[in-house]
Amino acid sequence: MGLGFSKGGDFKPYVSYNAKAGKLSQKKNDVDTDINLPVSFVADFAKIKTGWYYYATGQAPQVVHNPSLSVKAPRPAGDGADGKPLYKEGFTVDFFSPSAFGGVVEFSSSSMLVRDAINALYTAYEDGLAANAGMLPVVELSGTAKSVGKHGTNYAPVFKITKWVARPAEFDTAAANQSAATPTLQKAVSEF
């Protein structure tokens, strides 16, 4: 019987955006697949999280989420070999598309180009909330915009809201399944 440890694979499928290549890819069941643009999906901005993110090569990100969108957590200590802080501001948001992603996926980043694009998209979401109460935006990632700067050439994602829909139940189902598969320490502690 053993201790019941998982054999891995309990992680939510996710998509990532490579600003150097201007590519969106999905990691599911340990397989990376590029996603052709344009692509449309529902963004769960009602539950977006922000915080401090550290992405080390070949490892899951280390994240300290902010208590809320208006209250920031302290930046975790630690500097890289270049003397710059390891943790950068970032976000995590769930996307849903049965055709593009096979369901709900997580999207997170601390890339300035991606953060700026998501921030502009979130502002458009906030601007549309009054006319679309209780709904979520359908977002199109139509392509990329070239950006040349001190870090060379990068490509910012180009997002736009195309319409609004009722919140897909799959967001809550995916969250419940993830919680059941990987209980948090907080849940474990609260049981005692």
Image (cartoon, helix red, strand yellow):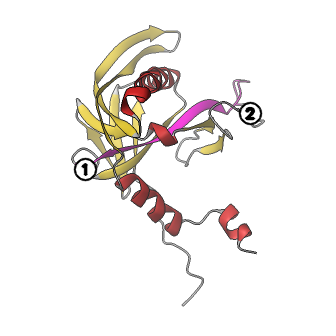
Disc 1 target residue: 98
SS under mark 1: loop
Q: Residue at x 47, y 62 (%)?
A: 176
Packing grade of label 2 (10 A; few <14, some 14-19, many >=20) is: some
Label 2 close to label 1 by CB (< 8 Å): no
**Mark toward the start of the polypeptide (2 vs 1):** 2
Query: Which residues make up the magenta segment?
Result: 80-98
| Quadrant in the picture for residue 159 | top left
As shown in the figure, which amino acid type bears the numbered disc 1? Pro
Q: Position of residue 34 (x, y in %)?
A: 28, 39
Magenta stretch contains residue 41? no
Residue 75 badge: 2
As shown in the figure, which amino acid type bears the numbered disc 2? Arg
Question: Viewer-proximal residue, 52 or 154?
Answer: 52
Magenta stretch contains residue 91? yes
Q: Nearer the viewer, mark 2 or mark 1?
A: 1
| Quadrant in the picture for residue 95 | top left
SS under mark 2: loop
Q: Position of residue 32 (x, y in %)?
A: 34, 47
Q: Is residue 146 left or right of residue 112?
A: left
Q: Residue at x 27, y 52 (%)?
A: 102
**Residue 181 shows up from this direction:** yes
Name above or below for residue 136 compared with residue 14: above
